Every structure is written in C-alpha cells, then in structure tokens.
Image (cartoon, rainbow, N blue to C red):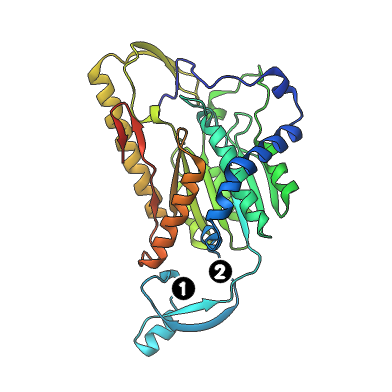
Amino acid sequence: MFKRLFGRSPPASSDAAVKAPAAQRADALLRRLEWTVLRRLDGLLQGHYRTLMRGSGLDLADLREYQLHDDVRHIDWNVTARLQQPHVRVFTEDREMAAWFLLDLSPSVDFGSGEQRKSDVLLQFTAVLARLIAGQGNRVGAMVYGSRGRARVEAMLPARGGRNHVLRIMQMLMPRPATKEPVPTNEAATRLGDLLRSAVFTVRQRSTVFVVSDFITQPGWEKPLGELARRHDVVAVRLVDPLELDLPDLGLIPIRDAETGEQIVVDTHDKGFRQRFARIAAQREAQLRESLARAGVDTLELATDEDLADAVLRFVDLRERRVRHGAGGRPMPTQLPRRTREGVRA
C-alpha cells in the first residue's frame, strides 16, 4: 500500500536538536515523558502493574480445578484424565520478570499525516513502557529492525534494568541524519518474519514481548509470531495513521511507497477511488486482525492522533477484564477509536 502522501510529514526538528548527541536528546525526551505521561500513569496504575506483564514462574507450586478465567495452556492433562475434572498448574510467580521490545523501524513506519509519525509513537510507547517496567525492578531488552532502511535486525540490547538502560534503548531509536546512500529495493522490503525468528532464538526465558510495528511487511511472519506466543506473553502493538484507512478529498496528489520508492499520481477527488481505497484498507485490516488472533497474541492499536496515556490505560483495563470474565487463553484485540472526516468511528 502506498504510504507517504505528497511527501507530507511533521515539521522537521531544528538543526540544533538534530546535531545534539543522541544521549542528550534521549534524556530530554524521557524527562518530558516522565512529566507528561508517566506522572499521570503512576497514580492510575497502582495495583494494576502486574497486568502489564503476566509472566509466570517455572516452579510448580500447586494444582487446582480449572476456573473460567484460567489460561488453557496451563491445564495438566494427565491429572485431568485421572480425575475426570480439568485441573491447571499453579506456578510460583517470578519476582523479577523480563520484557522485550521487538521494534520495526522500516521505511513505512516513518510516515505520519499529522504532528507525529508512526516512528514517534513507537519511540514514546517504548520509552514509557520500558520505564514503567524497569522502574518496578524488572529488566527490559530490545531488538531493532530496519533502522537504516535495510531489511535486517540492526541492533540488540540484552535485558537489563535501570533508567540508564532505558536511555540506551531510546538512543537506538532516535532519528538519524538522512543518508544519501541509496538502498536497493530488494533490501528495503520489510520482512518482519526475520525479526520474529531472531527473537525466537534470542529470547529464551519466558518474558512479555511487545512487537511494535505497522505490520506492513512481506508475508511469512504469522508462523514465527505463533512460535513466539507459545513460549511468551506476546502483545502485538500496531502503529496506524488515519490516512492509511480513510483518504480525504485532496485533488491530484503524488503518493509514494516508502518501502520501494515507487510513486504515482492519483485523483483523490474521485469518490469511486476513495471508496476503493477504503474498501481495500478495510479488507487488509480484517485479514491482519484475523492473523494476529490465529497467532494467539493480544493486540494494542496505537494511532498517531491518539493520546498515549489513554491507550495504555485502555489496554490495561481490557487485559484485566479478559482475566475477570473468562477470556482464558484467547487473544484479545484492543482497538482505538478512529477519527474520520465524519467524526469518530469505533
């Protein structure tokens, strides 16, 4: 799908900000997020922190009868067969857990129709969640894909704790000066499956894994995502922009595919074209959600025009409701309302 509309992007940062060392820019951004987002979440997440990371320990503590909210993956089938009543294993919870961020910085993520790009949302979400998790004494790690426009894992930081480690992760995600070196088309095409397969072999200890991407990628990512979800608590964090779903009437405009560089001119004044665009986008949305559900992962959608703190709180609330009302091992979609020209669409 063609991404960047007529080269439109948020206002560029100042030259001084671009030239500032990445460490200074990362620290300044984290301080701003600590004041504007984390400060707001601190009081609202009291008692709900464990919902963000639902990892379990490896030490078997007890067996009990299956209850409506239990994860079906914890059923002990041998005991169930002997007693003719479903029983689940109860594990001793790890006091220290780990979270991993699998971060897609491929070219299509560098798109935004408003004040923020999807890459900005990715950076802020990662900073906020990593700081929340590390602040509770847990460890966070990260794998970065496509940060230089090439379809491969570019960097990896092992899971460690502390604010300084969060800053190191943020530095890997900070915008880099544009390079004049052309990237071959076959190297620019996103293959998210490569990142997921790398994580399958890298992340050994059971962890909470956040896959942060717009999922605009070559096929073949569903199987490694399912493999990852069988061992870990996986959350697919989808980055979306309103213009990817609903094209406004802007007349004749050039549209460029951020992945391949291919560009065409389209007439958005044509109502039939806009309807076909919306229909294809809706079909892709349905197929993507179905694929994520089959993989058995929870889904959080982050739009470029949505409030980050509200999205995190909504996500925590829905995960808690899933446990209370018996969603068991089924995946849970978390969809944010979309703003359109006609208003708010659920």
Say what amino acid the circle numbered 2 marks: Ser
> Measured from the top left, where is residue 65 in percent x and y?
40, 82
- Mark in the foreground, 1 or 2: 2
Residue 90 in view (yes/no): yes
The reply to whether callout 1 and callout 2 are in contact (CB within 8 Å) is yes
Q: Categorize mark 2 by other alpha carbons within 10 Å: few (<14), some (14-19), many (20+).
A: some
Q: Residue at x 67, y 54 (%)?
A: 134
User: Residue 318 at x, y = what percent?
Assistant: 41, 56
Q: Which mark is residue 106?
A: none
In the image, 41 versus 167, the foreground residue is 41
Left or right: residue 258 versus residue 181 is left
Q: Which is more toward the observer, 143 or 131?
A: 131
Q: Residue furthest top?
A: 252
Q: Is residue 343 above or below residue 264?
A: below
Could you tell me residue 191's position as x and y percent? 51, 38
- State whether residue 232 is above or below residue 14: below
Which element carries disc 2, helix, strand or loop?
loop
Residue at the image point whose x is 59% and y is 44% from the top: 126
Q: Please provide percent x and percent y for residue 11.
A: 56, 19
Q: Is residue 296 visible?
A: no
Name the image quarter holding the N terminus.
Answer: top left
The image shows residue 125, relative to residue 149, as above or below, that is: below
Quarter of the figure with residue 326: bottom left
Which numbered tag is attached to residue 74?
1
Dot 1 lies on which element?
helix
Quarter holding the C terminus is top left
Nearest the viewer among 224 and 287 is: 287
Query: Which residue type carries mark 1?
Result: His
The residue that disc 2 covers is 56
Above or below 128: residue 105: above
Label 1 and label 2: CA atoms lie apart by 10 Å
